[in-house]
Amino acid sequence: MSDSALPHCQFHPSAAASWFCPACKANLCPGCTVLELQESSNTELLSCGRCGGAAEVLKVHRSQAPFGKRLLGAWLYPLRPSGLVALVAVGAVVAFSRWVFQYAPLLPGLVALAAWLGSFWGSLFWIVRSTSMGAQHFTAPDFQSIHDDLVDPAIRGVVATALIWVPGALFLWHFDETHRPLPLFGLMLLITLLYAPMALLFAATGESKLSLLNPVKVVGISVKLGRPYLMVVAWMVPLALVHALVMMVAAWVSSLPIPLMAPLVAEAISLFAPFVMARLIGLLLYAYGDRVGYGVDSEFYEPALPGAKPRGKKRAAKVPAPQQRETHRPELQRFTEIEPASAPAAQPAPRQRFIELEPEPAPVAAPEPLEARLVRAVEANALDEALALYRQLPERLPPLPAACHLAMGQKAATVGDYTLAVRALKQVAQHSPEDPLAPKSCVILARLYGERLGDAASAQKLYRHVVGRYPGTDAARFAQSRLPPA
């Protein structure tokens, strides 16, 4: 995020602010924020270096970061080590499934078709969802069942794009190569560019299959997203050109006389553009999903300066000057001042009767508790360090602030450690149900069950709990949107 888009310190206008003091209503830069040790609880607290009040982390909406810069980074997503592994893995499944589909009888062929389409669409949906939750790299999805991970994604992908491929198929079938009207072809291409990203977004986020065929709803969501959606659509033009070139390379590789390896590499190459497209859609949800009711509103706010550390020093209290005693005026002095008596001579020190012992060594300071280090790491937004500390905690977790459990649950989900994420989020729901963060924790936990672990029953149960337990909150409104109509 550029410094020009960030709030600036009230006392140092040229410095970006990363904390806020509710007491003096001032934005604070690292130089105006103090990190103090509370000896009673052995924890560190942030305070304002001006008034001494408790300082809070200053958060800004994700949309404050340049969205174009986010989209530009999507092109490198498939080329990272995890992305290359995903290209090869998905390419291998697709290549093998296509080969089986071509030569197998009817029933095995249908299974191969489901594996082919399901692995393709399932991987794209997974990229969209994981990106929307902040994942920076591709993480392997958890396989639950053939229906949930292959058949359902295949159906959703085909249905979501039906309004694109059905008119295209009719166009190719109705007009021969010499009588295809170019204006109509250009119009269909434009509609495809405008509609395809939103169709993929709808299919990836769990919308009902009926709504996938509702163009009015799809267009309405596109309008709510506004300019950012048009930016994604604009990127589809160069992406389509790159895809055409990549498919030419893939066709050449596939024609090489190298059994097994040539089709696998060709399929992996052909997945580059779809992976980039899925990443673009995921970034759109990550930055602007709250406009269309995706996620909880508070999820879309992040620390203004991630990783910033306070550098301020606590101001010393002003000590009042000692009052001078009242002196008599010389003319009122009735007695002559006497010279001060000389100090008595120092007496010689008595002789030691015993041999002095060696001084005892200074007591070694006890190591800082793991919980205190964890709290400090979370407050400093050092989430990688905090997650490593959180993993060291015993199975029976010690009492920690709800914000720590929530941050660790989100971070663990981002890196694919869903067992730890569920464990952390349950701590908030079970032990801090009155905390303001409890509704958000329940919603994220429900999404983990439904979108990552394939446990739709637990997800629906949690959504109903949020609606009944925390009515009127953003979390309750989101949970209600995920429940089937009564």
Image: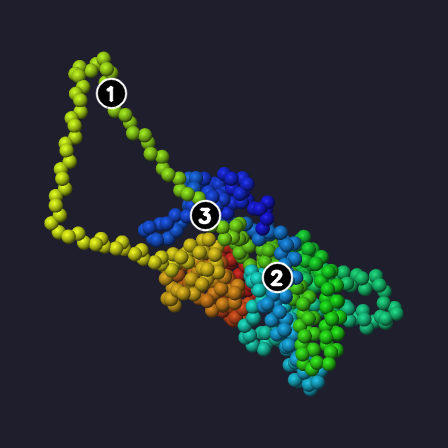
The residue that mark 1 highlights is 327
- Chain-order first, disc 1 or disc 3: 3
Q: Position of residue 129 (x, y in %)?
A: 58, 64
Marks 2 and 3 sit apart, C-alpha to C-alpha, by: 33 Å
Above or below 91: residue 339 = above
Q: Residues within 10 Å of mark 1 (few under 14, many from 20)?
A: few
- Figure quadrant of residue 360: bottom left
Marks 1 and 2 sit apart, C-alpha to C-alpha, by: 81 Å
- Residue 204 visible, this orientation: no
Marks 1 and 3 sit apart, C-alpha to C-alpha, by: 49 Å
Q: Position of residue 29 (x, y in %)?
A: 49, 44
> With 476 as the anchor, is 430 left or right in this view?
left
- Chain-order first, disc 1 or disc 2: 2
Q: Position of residue 314 (x, y in %)?
A: 40, 42
Amino acid of disc 3: Pro
Amino acid of disc 2: Gly
- Quadrant into which the C terminus falls: bottom right
Q: Secondary structure at mark 3?
A: loop
Residue found at the very far right of the displayed protein:
178
Please state the total of marks drawn on the protein image.
Answer: 3
Above or below 265: residue 217 = above
Q: Secondary structure at mark 1?
A: loop
- Chain-order first, disc 2 or disc 3: 2
- Figure quadrant of residue 397: bottom left
- Figure quadrant of residue 336: top left
Amino acid of disc 1: Thr
The residue that mark 2 highlights is 282
